[in-house]
Image (spheres, helix red, strand yellow):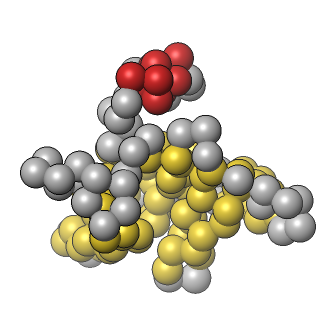
Amino acid sequence: MDAGDQQLWLKGPNGKACPGIAIGHFENADELSYAVLLVPQSNPGGGHKIVVFGKTKDVYSARLLDQAEGQTYSGLVISRTGPGKYDDWENTKSIQIELDGLRVEWMEQGAQLYYWRAGRYRKLQVSD
């Protein structure tokens, strides 16, 4: 993350959290899930993966939410959002989520909200 994006993150609402880890009730109200942003250390501009580890019947499983190969991750951060109402960036679609959501944001460029519904993750573009 470049210095400008780092300062934006530190001054924002999640500034004390790691920009590559989010913990929340993403899949189940009774169990915590763990989301991680993976970026290759050998080639930080060589893509990324976002993986969520969720617990079902005392066993954790990994779900790949997003990945990009060969694209820069510059300014990409993840954070937990609480349950509530969310609108897409054009105000044409509105959703109500009962569990935590995962916000995937390209600093000052756009953001997507991943949320659990009907046994799988769905995605809403919340800013552009």
Left-right relation of 119 to 53: right
Q: Position of residue 11 (x, y in %)?
A: 52, 17
In the image, is 49 to the left or to the right of 111?
Answer: left
Residue 35 visible to an observer of this rendering: no
At a point 17% along the width and 53% down the height, the residue shown is 43
Residue for point 36% across, 69% down: 67
Q: Check the image and name the residue furthest to the left.
A: 42
Question: Does residue 121 appear left or right of residue 125 in this picture?
Answer: left
- Pick the front one: 106 or 123: 106
Q: Quadrant of residue 46?
A: bottom left
The part of the image, by quadrant, that contains residue 88 is: bottom right
Residue at (46%, 29%) from the top-left corner? Answer: 5
> How many numbered marks does the figure carry?
0
Q: The N terminus lies in which quarter of the figure?
A: top left
Q: Where's residue 97, x and y in %?
A: 67, 61
Q: Position of residue 69 (x, y in %)?
A: 31, 70
Front-most of residues 79 and 11: 11
Above or below: residue 124 compared with residue 107: below
Q: Along the horizontal axis of the image, is 95 left or right of 122?
A: right
Residue 31: image quadrant is bottom left
Relative image position of residue 54 (x, y in whole percent): 32, 65
